[in-house]
Amino acid sequence: MKFIAAAILLFASALTPRSALSAEFYVAPDGSDAHPGTPERPLATLEGARDAARKAEGGPHRIVVMPGDYFLTETFRLDARDNGLTIEAAETGNAVLYGGTPVAEWRRDGDDFWYAELPDVKEGTRDFRALVVNGRLAERARLPETGTFTHKSTWDVRYLSNVGGGFERDPTEEELTTLFYDPDDLPDTLDINNAEVRVYHMWDEGLCGVARNDTERHALILSTPPRFPPGAFGVRQYVVLNTREGMTRPGQWYLDRTRGRLVYWPLPDEDMTQATVVAPRLETVIELAGSREERLTDITLRGLTIQATTTPLKASGFGAHAFEGALAIHWAQGGVLERLNICAVGGQGVKASEWLDGRIVDCDVHQTGAGGLRLHGLGLFVAHNRIRRVGLHYPGAIAMTAYTWRVDGANRMHIYRNEVHDAPYSGIVGGGPNFLIEENLIYRVMREMQDGAAIYGGIQDSILRGNLVRGVVQMGEGYGVSAYYLDEGARDNVVERNVAIGVERPVHNHMARNSVIRNNVFIAEGDMALSFQRSSGCTFEGNTLFIPGELRIVQPTGIAAWKENVIFRGGTAEEGAPQPFAIESDMPPIPAPRRMTHSARAVPVTEAPIIDGEIGQDEWPGELVRLDRDPSRFGAAGAPAFARLAYDERFLYVAVHVAAFDVAELRDGTTWEQDDGAELSLAGKTADGEPTVFVLRGFAGGEMKSVVEAGAPAEAAEQLGQTVRFAARPFGRTRGGWQGEWAIPFDALGITPEKGLKIPFNLAVYRSEDGVWRCWEGTLAETWQLDQAGTLELR
């Protein structure tokens, strides 16, 4: 067979012009790097063939990999010296490159288990968390056998969104690394040298080692911190991996670091004297690496199979981005990945950064511990690939992730006709501008995690067209799942001619602007929700909705235009009897929220905050006040804004934190309703004791005005303005915003402070980035109309 394949390749190369192909080098498992690399006398290693190609004149050259198994102990690397090189299998799929070495000399370990001695594991010089058995990524031993345990740690600090800055306060090291457990969950024999703990969060998880088991407090002290503390977002699930007690069914394994053994429970049809077991040594099998100064160009990899990589013990991050790819690409231009089979790898399948105008076509990426494809580049064409069964070790992993950046004239990132299925989190995630995501088939994603979608991301100026999503349902409690989800900072996107079948929330817009959702077909099995949470300027047009149950619109103020939609509703009465569908077009009427009854709370301080435009956590005690309504009293759109309120016997202190997606768009002038600013309205009294409303406007550039629009006498407004201290400053490089602080004398307001006092009050911000108002309470008119606003309570 090797001779026939070589003859075919020689015939094909004879038909290729010399200008396109200058030299060929063959590699075979039984070759030698002392050979010239001909079909009759092949080389033994890719390194040998690469070095021979570098020495050859002309080009571009080709390396042909003959069928067989290749066990790599070092990552195979190409750089700019190899530009134009093609590496391809003589027979697609039959040249297998392993990022590890075979494990042999298996012995019985009781009735069910087998083990192999690994002295370097006992010595602490080798560690891995993936194992390949007969081409399959074997399952790690786990407790419990199915599902998860529930731990007892809590973390009730509010999450302010990504653009809002994360949690209201940072966790301590102890909060990050302490997990309180039910003593019935864990055996007394637990070996913490082996045990690893997967701590679940809402949309990702952390895999951690164990430094100590505090059996008195029933607490595991984690040796590697997760990204978020245990209990964050109200999620309290965890599992324990890699213990002997977790070996509950055939096909599982664990690495006994204490005894220096690899232990495996064979499947019924596996013979350990014949099985091919590969223990990974590498995170990356092939690396294509140019540099900022000199990109690697026009490399082609075709027909190869890549298996057996591992990951280090560390927090995986969003989408398991912390881990390398079995195939890694950095600073590349052009090039093609074609008909690759990347499977049974512990980390990402392919991970690329700074890749321009490359192609990934007809590849099969499956059985990955982390994600399938993780791409960062411009003008990539990703088509006709199959991405499936990903996130087997890291359930926060994403099947396909792609990020771009803004460059004038760059080609779109084109993700076309891929089949994506069986992922614990999202199917396709995009970030940045200029995507065309079309005609992809996505199903059975979001199988474990929350707050994701079949297609998800903060994309801009992009098109989602002709995709089909089915079988995406919510597993457990959380923030929900969607078919098409445009998240924080998404703007100016078109979602058209897509289909969603059996997804309760087919579209979810969160802090999105100017989404156009048109000519789609959304088919529900029961109720349906269309979500425009904190969004603005969206169009919903020409869509067909099939809804046996109820239709719910989340934040209808996010919809600027609703027209020519067709809604098929009903079909089943409450008692289950059939009934006709109603055919409608109108958006369901939704009443405005009621006026708030609770007060914003100011807390007493013994040490006054420093009025410098920088809100220090130690300076401002008490809870955050969310400015999350617009004047209509519906939820406000865009990035969040928050306030802090405090007082002492002389001053009322107010601080605002206004987030923005692009700090460069801040306007630091002093024109209200044009430049970025905040408006504080308070009921007070003039020097004559007459009730009035004071309005203070502070601007992002640091200026402040005391104005008379609410009826305050000019003299009283001027006097107040002269006694108030105000400072403001921007923060962040790209995403960020601005912060402002006031110190307002109570005597200038005509107020005597005392505990329990309630003051008619409102606080509003205007953000020029998106022309959005956010306030403490919507008044249905001007925000300073305090008879319709809220109150501030001195606690």
Image (cartoon, rainbow, N blue to C red):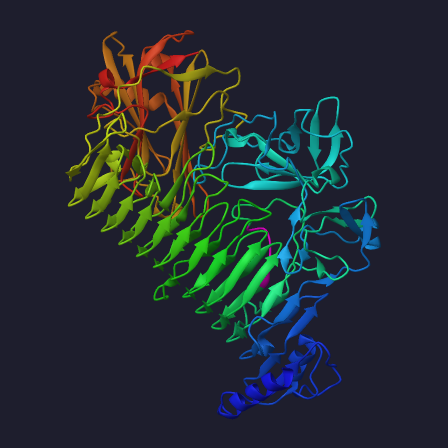
Q: Position of residue 341 (x, y in %)?
A: 55, 65
Q: Position of residue 373 (x, y in %)?
A: 50, 58
Q: Nearer the viewer, residue 137 or 614?
A: 137
**Residue 389 in sight from this viewpoint:** yes
Q: Nearer the viewer, residue 246 or 119?
A: 246
Q: Position of residue 471 (x, y in %)?
A: 40, 45
Q: Is residue 592 left or right of residue 37?
A: left
Q: Position of residue 120 (x, y in %)?
A: 82, 54
Residue 274 sits inside the magenta stretch: no
Quarter the N terminus occupies: bottom right
Instruction: Specify the segment rendered in magenta.
Output: 321-327
Residue 621's place in the image compared with 247, above or below, is above
Q: Nearer the viewer, residue 734 or 632?
A: 632
Quarter the C terminus occupies: top left
Q: Is residue 353 left or right of residue 650?
A: right
**Residue 404 in sight from this viewpoint:** no
Quadrant assignment, res 583: top left
Quadrant assignment, res 791: top left
Q: Is residue 134 left or right of residue 417?
A: right
Quadrant assignment, res 294: bottom right
Q: Residue at x 60, y 53 (%)?
A: 323
Q: How many marks?
A: 0
Q: Residue at x 56, y 68 (%)?
A: 291
